[in-house]
Image: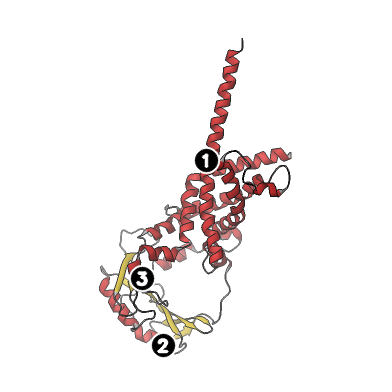
Amino acid sequence: MTKLGLRNLWFQFHKWIGLALAILILPLCISGAALVWHDALDKALNPGRYAVTAAEPKLTPPAYVDSALAALTDGERIASMRFEHGEPVLITATQPRKPSAREGGRPVRIMVWLDPANAHVLDKARSDAGLVRTLHNIHGNMMVPGVGRTIVGALGFAMLVSSISGLWLWWPTVGSALRGVRWRRHRNFDTNLHHMMGFWIALPLFVLSLTGAWISFPALFGNGPVDVAGRMAKMRAMPLAKSVQSIDEAIARARSLEAGQLKSMEWPTDQRATWTLGFKTKDGPVTIAVDDAKGTSERSKSTGPQPDATGRLMRRIHDGTGMGIAWQIVIFLGGLLPAGLALTGVIMWWRARLWRNDLASRQNQKVVATP
């Protein structure tokens, strides 16, 4: 195949991927850009739930539990509690199972935000409610339960090919690569904008597309199969109606092994009757498991920093968690610019289509006018 033929092949790949997926790429990219600032966005949309009057908890854990129970209804049971410096105490509750409920899908949780100073209820909401959760659903499964994650993964592969083919097409056919960074490579503003945005976003888009596809299809990349059924079963687990160990007893038994700062608690469930308590220590996070029936406790994870699993690393790179403000800005632009590329690409295709139709019309008129 000649160089011109190979370039035309890449052009066809690039054009039809962009046209076929433009409608899906727009919400995927825009939602991903917004979710880079997940916490800040949630605080801006729901300032009341973060209006704390103390940076650290001032009451005992049972006091926060009692306050949350007063706000819960319809047999909702507390499943976990989280403490973060400067943040509200977050309690998560599980709704009772309904006989008619489907086994598939993510179960709905009830979130209760409490003031660390006095256990005052700042807000209460379903885990599937609000704009931020909607953005997560768009970016994670395109609002399509079941096959949505596969669709998103396929889009990741498509954008991977698009970024490679776009960089190939950006490369000047004549002269050095420096010609490619010039603004006026074409007489149309949108075409110049498409070339310029495509160049600067090509490498970040490649990384984000690869990590997005990896998250959707971990087994395909050799990261091992994901036990989806086991994960969903764990999420559907119901906290015990009445535990053997009280909250204070579970904390006391955990503190027999660890005296660090309590950061989280998970209640025993009908699938695993164990209290799980997370502590912050000078050597790193520590997790203690307390058997609800026997009252025995054990350290379930070693102290010190734990190595990142490949899947977790891919997710951190993809969403920017703990990666620094510079990479988070790159991810943010990596969401906005592909949306701009999709729009300018459609404009370029439509203009070329009109030009070809006009050319064909003029040629037909010449044929008719020829005696």
In terms of depth relative to the viewer, which is nearer, 308 or 117? 117
| Of callouts 3 and 1, the N-terminal one | 3
**Residue 50 disc label:** 3
Q: Position of residue 4 (x, y in %)?
A: 71, 38
In the structure shown, which secondary structural element does the residue marked by tag 1 occupy? Answer: helix
Q: Position of residue 350 (x, y in %)?
A: 52, 35
**Residue 153 disc label:** none
Q: CA distance from mark 3 to mark 2?
A: 32 Å
Which residue has dot 1 on it? 346
- Judge whether residue 94 can be spotted in this image: no
Q: Amino acid at mark 1?
A: Val
| Of callouts 3 and 2, the N-terminal one | 3
**Residue 253 disc label:** 2
Residue 337 vs 184, above or below: the answer is below
Give the residue at x 47% y 84%.
298
Q: Amino acid at mark 2?
A: Arg
Give the residue at x 57% y 39%.
188
Q: Position of residue 145 (x, y in %)?
A: 42, 54
